[in-house]
Image (cartoon, helix red, strand yellow):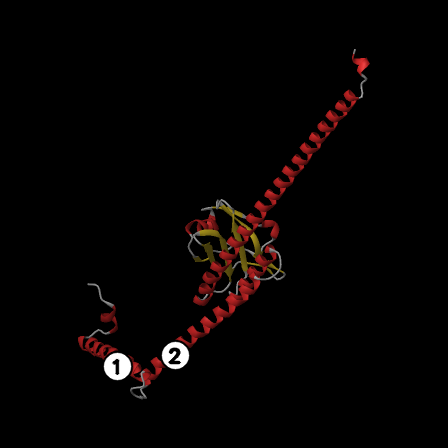
């Protein structure tokens, strides 16, 4: 015969019944406290009940934490907005973005991957905690980065030992937690952000990463669009110059032909009539 946990904790039927009564009474107290709490919120009554006060205190703590997190996220997003508008090169802005992510998310390692124009692969363009010479490229579906790029979903996991090695003057160690977020803007996958930390990421960290990834995606797509436009303008300008040079060369050739014809006509006019007989 298999004994339940209740039978093990409360061997006699009387003990089990007493425990059940306590549970029912406690549940009723919680229900009453929640109802009273709503009345307190609405200003209908004033009450001094230990359970009600405890529940209200916990609720207020949660609300304050949520309000603080919201204010922190807004402030952080404003900092990223300033980076986007800086009058520096795109690469420098990419690096500042990664540095800011490490700062706000309390990370120890981060990489910004930008997708190719045909969206076949992503290439590291800026990093924190990685040698620039070792910047990797991932095909769509290859590794965690490639999977995030393909599936367009947030990836969160606790990393195994030696998954990522971070070196410093104090030695080398592996972070325990990793987040990967796709950069999506107007149904275009602009890249992937990868960030790792020795401590677990909070819900506020994840929310900030998702919001920032959207802003970064918009920045990347707009930057690519501007670059493509400038490249097209340069190509058109080069073609115009080439056409202009060809027209100039043709005009010079025509001028030379006309000049020679005029010379021949003049020479013919200068021949005496007697000589023609």
In front here: 134 or 252?
A: 252
Residue 134 percent coordinates (x, y): 59, 49
Q: Residue at x 42, y 73 (%)?
A: 66
Mark 1, residues whose alpha carbon is within 10 Å: few (<14), some, or many (≥20)?
some
Outermost residue toward the front in this view:
273
- Among the two numbered marks 2 and 1 on one chain, the one whose residue lies closer to the N terminus: 1
Q: Is residue 159 visible?
A: no
Q: Residue at x 28, y 81 (%)?
A: 33
The alpha-carbon separation of the residues under discs 2 and 1 comes to 18 Å
Q: Is residue 230 above or below residue 80?
A: above
Residue 135 percent coordinates (x, y): 57, 50
Residue 14 percent coordinates (x, y): 18, 78
CB within 8 Å, label 2 to label 1? no
Outermost residue toward the left in this view:
13
- Name the residue beneath numbered marker 1: 32
Q: Secondary structure at mark 1?
A: helix
Q: Is residue 239 above or below residue 114?
A: above
Check the picture and name the quadrant holding the C terminus: top right
Q: Secondary structure at mark 2?
A: helix
Horizontal side of 242 relative to 81 (left or right) equals right
Q: Residue at x 26, y 81 (%)?
A: 32
Tell me, for residue 240, which label it has, or none. Answer: none
- Name the residue beneath numbered marker 2: 60
Residue 164 percent coordinates (x, y): 52, 55
In front here: 206 or 252?
A: 252
Check the picture and name the quadrant holding the N terminus: bottom left
Mark 2, residues whose alpha carbon is within 10 Å: few (<14), some, or many (≥20)?
few
In front here: 257 or 150?
A: 257
Q: Dividing the picture into quarters, in which one does residue 249 lie?
A: top right
Q: Dividing the picture into quarters, in which one does residue 40 lie?
A: bottom left
Horizontal side of 263 relative to 81 (left or right) equals right
Horizontal side of 197 relative to 60 (left or right) equals right
């Amino acid at each position: 015969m298999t004994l339940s946990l209740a039978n093990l904790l409360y061997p006699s039927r009387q003990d089990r019944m007493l425990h059940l009564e306590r549970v029912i009474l406690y549940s009723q107290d919680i229900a009453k406290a929640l109802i009273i709490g709503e009345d307190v919120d609405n200003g209908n009554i004033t009450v001094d009940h230990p359970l009600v006060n405890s529940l209200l205190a916990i609720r207020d703590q949660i609300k304050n934490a949520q309000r603080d997190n919201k204010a922190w996220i807004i402030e952080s997003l404003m900092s990223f907005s300033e980076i986007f508008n800086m009058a520096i090169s795109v690469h420098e802005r990419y690096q500042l973005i990664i540095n800011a992510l490490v700062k706000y998310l309390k990370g120890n390692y981060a990489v910004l991957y930008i997708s190719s124009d045909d969206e076949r692969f992503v290439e590291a363009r800026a990093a924190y905690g990685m040698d620039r010479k070792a910047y990797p490229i991932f095909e769509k579906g290859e590794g965690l980065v490639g999977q995030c790029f393909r599936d367009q979903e947030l990836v969160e996991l606790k990393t195994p030992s030696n998954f990522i090695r971070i070196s410093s003057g104090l030695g080398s160690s592996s972070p325990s937690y990793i987040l990967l977020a796709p950069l999506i803007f107007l149904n275009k996958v602009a890249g992937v952000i990868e960030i790792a930390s020795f401590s677990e990421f909070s819900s506020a960290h994840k929310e900030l990463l998702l919001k920032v990834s959207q802003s970064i995606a918009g920045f990347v797509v707009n930057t690519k669009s501007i670059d493509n436009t400038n490249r097209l303008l340069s190509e058109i300008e080069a073609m115009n110059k080439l056409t202009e040079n060809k027209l100039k060369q043709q005009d010079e050739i025509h001028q030379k032909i006309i000049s020679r014809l005029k010379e021949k006509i003049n020479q013919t006019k200068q021949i005496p009539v007697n000589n023609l007989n």
